[in-house]
Structures are given as C-alpha cells and as structure tokens.
Amino acid sequence: MPFAIIAYDKSGASVLRAQLREAHLKYLSERQDIMLAGGAMLDEAGLPIGGLIILNTEDRLAAENFAAGDPFRTGGVFDTVQVIPWRKSFFDFQRCA
C-alpha cells in the first residue's frame, strides 16, 4: 500500500521555503522513481502552505526516511509532517480494483 506524506508549513516560513526550494526540488528529482504524485498545497490566494507526496512503497520506514530527508523538513519549513498509508481507489483517471 502506498504512503502519503502530508506536510504543513510553519507560519511565516515563506522566505525559508523560497531559500530551500531548489534543494527540495533536487531531492525530489533524485527520488522521482518512487513518487506517484507530489506538489505544493496552496491557500486560497495560491500561496504554498505545505506539500503532498504519494510514494509507491510498501515500506513505512522508507516513507518515513523519505520525509525525514526532505530539505524543507531538515531546514525547518514544516510545522507538521504525517506519513500515512494510502489506498488507491481512483488513479490516472480510472477506478482501481
């Protein structure tokens, strides 16, 4: 079962987020082979307030390590990070079995 990583930014972390963005994107690009989806979560004004990543792994420890190594997390952007199992019901515009 895949894992979803849901992270919320600390209040006022926008400057830090901008500073760490390139390192964050590099980190994700180097691991894109296990990522089903990922991207920023936005507020109503379109500004980032966190992120969501869905990993194609059955290994909770691998998902936790993925989340722990993200430069946004190690750099202090995130306030909270959850790593939770995710069951595919719909994916790529199709109903899953």
Image (spheres, grey):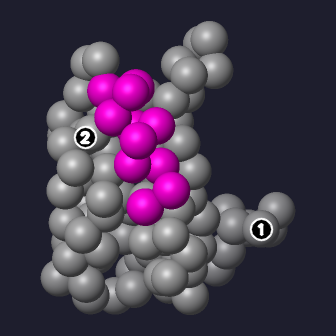
Residue that badge 1 annotates? 92
Q: Residue at x 27, y 39 (%)?
A: 77
Q: Residue 37: name its quadrant.
A: bottom right
Front: mark 2 or 1: 2
| Residue 73 on image: x %, y % | 24, 52
Q: Quadrant of the N terminus?
A: bottom left
Is residue 54 visible in the rendered image? The answer is no
Q: Residue 3: name its quadrant.
A: bottom left
Front-most of residues 25 and 61: 25
6 up-or-down from 49: above or below: below
Q: Which residues are magenta?
A: 13-23
Q: Amino acid at mark 1?
A: Asp
* Residue 32 marker: none
Q: Residue at x 19, y 35 (%)?
A: 79
Front-most of residues 89 and 63: 63
| Residue 61 on image: x %, y % | 17, 82
Q: Secondary structure at mark 1?
A: loop
**Residue 77 lies in the magenta stretch:** no
12 up-or-down from 75: above or below: above
**Residue 19 lies in the magenta stretch:** yes
Q: Residue at x 47, y 49 (%)?
A: 21
Residue that badge 2 annotates? 78
